[in-house]
Image: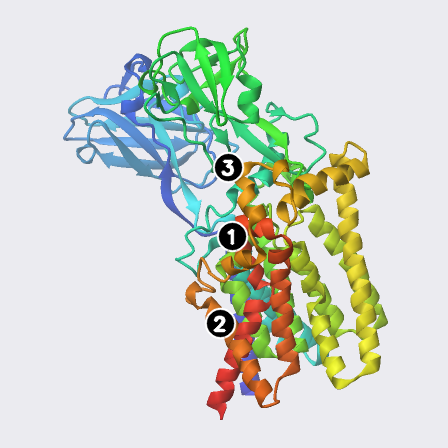
Amino acid sequence: MQKNNKKNIGFIVLITAIVALFLLVGPLNFFKHGYYDSEVSFDEISQDELLDEYDVSTQEFSTTFIPASKNLTGVAVYFKNQSSTEGTVNLNISDASGNVVDSEDVELSKINGNTWYKVYTTGKYKPSQTYTLSISTSNANDAVILQEVPAECFVSEVQTDTALISFAYKKSTFNAESRILISILLLSTLVVVVSTQLGGSSKSRAKTVGFIGILVSILAWNYTFNSMDTNNTSFDIFQTDSESLSKSIVDADAYPNYYTSDDINKYGLARYSNINGEYYGFKNAYLSDDDWDNGYSKNESAIALSVSPYTATVAVAGNQLKFGNGDIFEIKKVTRDDTNYILEFYGPVLSVEKQGSLDNAVFLDSNGAELPRGYLAQYDRQYGLQGKIFRILYRILHNGKVSTHLYRLGCSLMAAFVFVIISYLIKKKYNTLMAGCFLFTFWLSPWVVNFAHNMYWVEFTWFIPMTIGLFCSLNIHSRTSRVVTYILTFISILIKCLCGYEYISTIMMGLIAFLIVDLVVAINKNDKKEIILLIRTIIILGILAIAGFLVAICIHAQVRGGGNILEGIKIIIKNDVMRRTSGANLNDFSYNLWSSINASVWEVVCKYFRFSTEIVTGIPGNLFPLLAMIPAALFLTDSLKKQVNIEEATLYFVMLVTTLSWIVLAKSHSYIHTHISFVLWYFGFIQICFYIVIKRVLAYFKK
């Protein structure tokens, strides 16, 4: 009895601790730290902007302010002159009713002149209320000077005339993504703990749900922060150019004063451009050579700007350009070469030293009115369902106040969930070791990690069909389950294709890969009933997958063809399909694509056996050819002994074909896109190679 009481007390304490930690990290956001302010450098303020001085040794200074958040932790005050060796300075903060919120006395001997002095406050503040800050001195033996500044130098909190002051705040120890992931981890742990007190099937289900949540939070953490691989240096900038297509379409609502193409709302993706080229991390370098310096001509009144939809719109003779230093010159003439627009002005020779960086230049119309600072051009190579969804989320979630970082976290969580479910289904169908190989690879692959959070690639859509195929394989004898998978197959392929056609052959192969393995095993066993069932199921899944693909093509073509589906299909085939596959006419494409069109399939396949990164964290990419060949060598050895494991050999071969299907069919695309397409090896092939090798090693040591 006493033993049971101790167990119950321990259970209650553990539950209480988990719930308390969840509340502190999650809803309450309790953990905060630091003293962060936004001081203005006195040296950066023009002497012409300085106003009177306050000598607080003879008069009290006061101003009103409204805190930007409840985490106000201090006030920084700039003392322009302070030479008192005696006395104290008092800082007093009171609310609108005159009640003192906090008061601090500081010895003047501790404060130097021409410096910011940081004062800490322990008061409790409300962002919506007005407070008064008063500064005075006692027994000062010399002047104590504060500098009055104009309104443009005020910090946002200040409501009345002020000296040079700043307000400091604590920051949350955990950012929003961390809090969400930690909360999921804690809630999942809570479910696992509670499951120990349940019985029967409820215990098993709760435990499974809890462990799935724990694994999802662990994987999503790595997809969000790349915390497991210091060698993955491309994580922060990986495919930011592609991701900008999703982010830019949100800007169509966030910044309605941008120029936009006429059919911007037809597609879900857009390309933003401004005066220095592309946005979101990619900035074109201004022309610099013997005749040009950072975009400025050394010989005449002219500048060079990169070719973009924005410059094409605003770089027009008669318009004006206002430079960073305030100079305004009218555009006399505009010419264009392959990469730049050359803008000539009525005026003297310009320079970056005089006029400043072209980043700060603004176009004006002929009447001097400022023109929009960006252009959004629709991206029509795909329908862009992901961009449309993110745009809807922007409109729903507090008019865009939700950061795109949380959209990326959503992608990470979805990817983690799909990968955990795949691993769980593999455990049920095969064994724990194979499931572990899949989960381990999904967790630590630099390629999977880099794609997982990307708002353009939405990687989880690639693997949903594989999840559906695995579920169908596990429940092949249930008619209801098969019908459900048929419906989900059509929907998942349709959604994937509306988000982009990349890797679609590999994705479709992933859908039926495990069913094909089952079919080969059934043929080996001569199980005719099973063979017929599997063939029928594979054919239906294949037909529905192709149907989803064709419907997506028609939806895309209807928009791209201006309402004419057939015309749109012709455009898609000519401009998108042919340049990615084989058999294209070189005359239809630019010179930079010729090498990819001319390349042989063998040449392209060989490229993808030279791994450019680690296979997974800690395993060098140079080992990939060896990892890929060891299973084949083992199967060859087994065949000589007539001991081949048909299921494992078929898994190896089918997963190899799954990867190579896109590399071969989209040969021209694969030739160019080696910076992204190594991810194809993670559609099961690398996982199966790990499984076969590890299983053999374990079997050897077991003997």
**Figure check: 37 above or below 358:** below
Q: Amino acid at mark 3?
A: Tyr
The picture quadrant where one finds residue 74 is: top left
**Mark 3: which secondary structure?**
loop
Q: Amino acid at mark 2?
A: Leu
- Between 257 and 22, the residue placed more toward the observer is 257
* Up-down relation of residue 241 to residue 201 (above or below): above
Figure label count: 3
Q: Position of residue 30 (x, y in %)?
A: 48, 51
- Label 2, label 1: how many angstroms apart (C-alpha)? 20 Å
Looking at this rendering, what residue extends furthest in the bottom direction?
A: 703
Q: Residues within 10 Å of mark 3 (few under 14, many from 20)?
A: some
**N-terminal of the two: label 2 or label 1?**
2
Residue receiving disc 1: 674
Horizontally, residue 196 falls left or right of residue 341, namely: right
- Between circles 3 and 2, the one closer to the viewer is 2
What residue is disc 2 on? 627
Q: Earlier in the sequence, mark 3 or mark 2?
A: 3
Instruction: State the residue in front, 510 or 169.
Output: 510
Q: Secondary structure under badge 1? A: loop
- Any mark on residue 280, and which? 3
Residue sitting at x 59%, y 78%:
432
Question: Residue 68, percent across and down?
Answer: 47, 34
Q: Is residue 641 above or below residue 150?
A: below
Counting residues from the start of the chain, the first of labels 3 and 1 encountered is 3
